[in-house]
Image: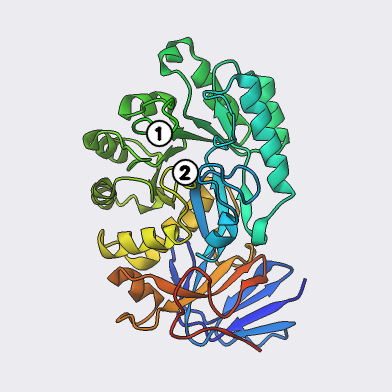
Amino acid sequence: MPSLLITNIGALVTGDLKNPLRQADSIYIENGTIREIGKGLSRKADRMIDAQGITAIPGLVDSHSHPSIGEYTPAQNSLSWITNYMHGGVTALISAGELHLPGLPLPPDARTALSLAIVTKRCYDNLRPSGVKVFAGTLLLVPGLTEKDFDEIAAAGIRLVKFIFYDYSLLPNGEAERYVRWARSRGIKVKIHSGGVSRSGVSQVAGFEIVSKIQPDIIGHITGGPIPMPEEEMIRIVAERDYCVEICSSGNYRMALSLIRAVKAKNAYHRVLIGTDTPGGTGIIPRGMLREIAFLSSVAEVKPDIAVCMATGNVGRAHGLDIGLLEEGHPADLVLLHKITGSVAKDALDSFAKGDLPGISMVIIDGEIRVAGRSQQTPPPERVASQK
């Protein structure tokens, strides 16, 4: 794989809340991995990029997506959506369940749920549309699963399970508690669909009490997907629990503002994840992650570099994945972007702060240039990175 040196970066967002902005202007990449970040690097490389003073951020990681069959989504009967998301800066998608498969009985029985997860995992292991990393095969938890089933998904490399169709009237029998224990003992994260019923009409309602009984690692779309739990219950979760919480494009924007107020009060930015909860009834939103960062930066007044961390490093850490960071030793997934021609902003971060979308010049995944010049999904940036 060719080595790559990127120079003349204006601002570099790391994706790490502990040090979101790094004083560096160069990144050296070798074998798909970031080997060195610094100032004025002049290492020999197979390919050279002059960033022309624009901003570098980690590739965006959608914490809540619903892939089904390659790049086809039955939810909207559409093709090539993953490539379009990549042109919106998304370099990784984390599946919250492959529940849009045509004809899938909802809720599925245990054997169907297990088979669906394993087949989808193996398919996306062999398919990376436009280089995008699709972490699929999320097991939908339903009654009747066994500990051997958790052995099987762990062996297949599945690292996420989700409560969405589970009948919570069965909680006293201890089965759900065993599921959580079996998952965690195998390094598998637990997510829960929160709030009201989803488009399927058969998902289970989950607010503060149910979430507290399940004790998940991640609360899916806590601000609505599309219907959130009661506001006071959401605020209690932030104040009294330590679960990670998702803000999704499909949710309630007023509740997103309420959540951020609660997060600010607890200084709990490390718990916030950004996703889209698409494709689904909300549609296909190639710029969904960018729009959510801009909304939180401009309306909720979260610092833009912090909001970017919520869509990158926070997501990778919460899901136990080595993605979302511009740091040495991590995969070279990054986006070069700048203010759009005509914007009053100074640069990409100022664009987010003003509520504007930036324009994408380059998307790089595992050190390979996937978008060059400009994105098909954003207006052109005022300056573009150039290859030497």
**Direction from residue 180 to residue 172 in the image, left or right:** left
The residue most toward the front is 77
**Which residue has dot 1 on it?**
198
265 above or below 144?
below
Amino acid at dot 2: Gly
Residue 217 placement (x, y as % from top left): 47, 37
How packed mark 1 is, by other alpha carbons closer than 10 Å (few <14, some 14-19, many 20 or more), is some
**Which element carries disc 1, helix, strand or loop?**
loop
Q: Which mark is residue 280?
A: 2
Q: Residue sitting at 35 percent across and 67 percent down?
A: 304
Examine the rendering and report whether any part of residue 184 can be seen: no
Residue 273 placement (x, y as % from top left): 42, 50
Examine the rendering and report whether any part of residue 116 can be seen: yes
Q: Nearer the viewer, residue 8 or 113?
A: 113
In the rendered view, how is the structure colored? Answer: rainbow
Residue 213 placement (x, y as % from top left): 39, 23
**Direction from residue 26 to residue 296 in the image, left or right:** left
Q: Pick whichever of labels 2 and 1 is earlier in the sequence.
A: 1
Check if mark 2's residue and mark 1's residue have beta carbons within 8 Å.
yes
Q: CA distance from mark 2 to mark 1?
A: 10 Å
Q: Residue sitting at 72 percent across and 86 percent down?
A: 44
Q: Which mark is residue 209?
A: none
Q: Residue sitting at 47 percent across and 43 percent down?
A: 280
Q: Nearer the viewer, residue 203 or 11?
A: 203
Residue 188 placement (x, y as % from top left): 59, 36
**Which element carries disc 2, helix, strand or loop?**
loop
Amino acid at dot 1: Ser
| Figure quadrant of residue 128 | bottom right
